[in-house]
Image (tube, rainbow, N blue to C red):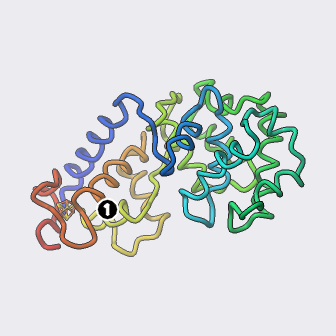
């Protein structure tokens, strides 16, 4: 029998520490300038939104580079400049000289629609999606209103805004965990979920454990997975979960 309460408390405590830490540059890619653009929520908040829309069916890093590639090609990245691009222009920017996405046709359409929606619904300022201290559900909903944004990326976007960019919401109930490979492995080894749990199972497990802010637990779990709870040769002696983890030293 696992000590679920102790495991949850430690994940939440570490999550809270990270949540309250000062904002730092978030690394999305391996290119500094691209990351600076994505982190510029004041000057270019649409860069973050456009990258979220592009983040499907290719490696995340490649998707998150797309706004910066547009800026390189256009010589700027203001919403006014982007709005001046026709759908044919956007398609050309996405395809030449090399395709920026695996599904350039579909993604060019999503990108054009996103720019139009930011201009028409949010007055050209994408930060209006999150700047009125809305509930977490409202922000997830607003992301889902963009064509091409599914529940997974909407949840990830809102999670990043809250945890990494320190954007304030009136609640955090609708920010779920992002069940990546590290989170999945750590949840399994801690005895919180079976190793073959589906993404939905993991999400609901986290909701049950910490309903006020389920997503608070994914960064600590990810961190444990990256630092100590590796697929092979775990470093359990260094892991702060060792005394409550039933798998410790058996992997
Ligand atoms: S104690 Fe070991 S098995 Fe358990 S979570 Fe930490 S690294 Fe993984």
Look at the image and tell me in which quarter the C terminus lies. Answer: bottom left
Residue sitting nearer the eye, 140 or 58 = 58
Total number of numbered labels?
A: 1
Please state the horizontal and vertical placement of residue 153, each as a whole percent of the image: 59, 53
Occupied quadrant, residue 235: bottom left
Question: Quick check: 71 above or below 125?
Answer: below
Residue sitting nearer the eye, 176 or 127 = 127
Residue at the spot 30% in from the left edge and 67% down from the top edge = 188
Name the residue that disc number 1 marks. 187
Residue at the spot 36% in from the left edge and 60% down from the top edge = 183
Please state the horizontal and vertical placement of residue 61, each as a whole percent of the image: 54, 56
Is 178 displayed left or right of 80 in the figure?
left
Is 50 displayed left or right of 173 in the figure?
right
* Ligand 1 quadrant assignment: bottom left
Occupied quadrant, residue 71: top right
Crowd band around label 1 with a 10 angstrom C-alpha radius: few (<14), some (14–19), many (20+):
many
Question: Quick check: 249 above or below 205?
Answer: below
Question: Quick check: 14 above or below 194?
Answer: above
Is 186 displayed left or right of 236 in the figure?
right
Numbered disc 1: secondary structure:
helix
Look at the image and tell me in which quarter the N terminus lies. Answer: bottom left
In the image as oriented, which residue stretches furthest toward the bottom?
196
Residue at the spot 65% in from the left edge and 52% down from the top edge = 66
Residue at the spot 18% in from the left edge and 71% down from the top edge = 233
Please state the horizontal and vertical placement of residue 154, each as a whole percent of the image: 60, 49
Residue labelled 1 has its Cβ within 8 Å of some atom of ligand 1: no
Please state the horizontal and vertical placement of residue 240, each as a whole percent of the image: 16, 50
Question: Quick check: 201 above or below 74?
Answer: below
Residue sitting nearer the eye, 85 or 197 = 85
């Amino acid at each position: 029998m696992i000590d679920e309460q102790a495991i949850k408390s430690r994940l939440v405590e570490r999550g809270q520490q990270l949540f309250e830490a000062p904002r730092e540059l978030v690394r999305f890619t391996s290119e500094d300038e691209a990351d600076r653009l994505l982190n510029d929520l004041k000057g270019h908040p649409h860069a973050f939104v456009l990258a979220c829309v592009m983040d499907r069916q290719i490696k995340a890093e490649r998707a998150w580079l797309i706004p910066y590639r547009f800026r390189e090609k256009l010589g700027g990245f203001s919403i006014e400049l982007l709005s001046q691009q026709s759908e044919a222009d956007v398609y050309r920017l996405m395809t030449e000289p090399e395709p920026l996405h695996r599904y350039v046709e579909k993604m060019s359409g999503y990108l054009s629609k996103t720019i139009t929606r930011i201009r028409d619904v949010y007055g050209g300022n994408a930060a209006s999606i999150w700047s009125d201290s809305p509930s977490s559900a409202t922000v997830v909903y607003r992301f889902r209103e963009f064509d091409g944004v599914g529940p997974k990326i909407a949840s990830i976007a809102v999670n990043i805004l809250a945890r990494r960019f320190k954007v304030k919401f009136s609640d955090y109930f609708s920010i779920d965990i992002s069940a990546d490979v590290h989170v999945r492995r750590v949840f399994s080894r801690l005895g919180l979920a079976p190793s073959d749990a589906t993404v939905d199972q993991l999400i609901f497990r986290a909701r049950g454990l910490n309903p006020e802010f389920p997503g608070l637990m994914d960064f600590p779990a990810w961190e444990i997975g990256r630092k100590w709870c590796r697929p092979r040769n775990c470093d359990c002696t260094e892991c702060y979960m060792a005394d409550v983890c039933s798998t410790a030293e058996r992997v």
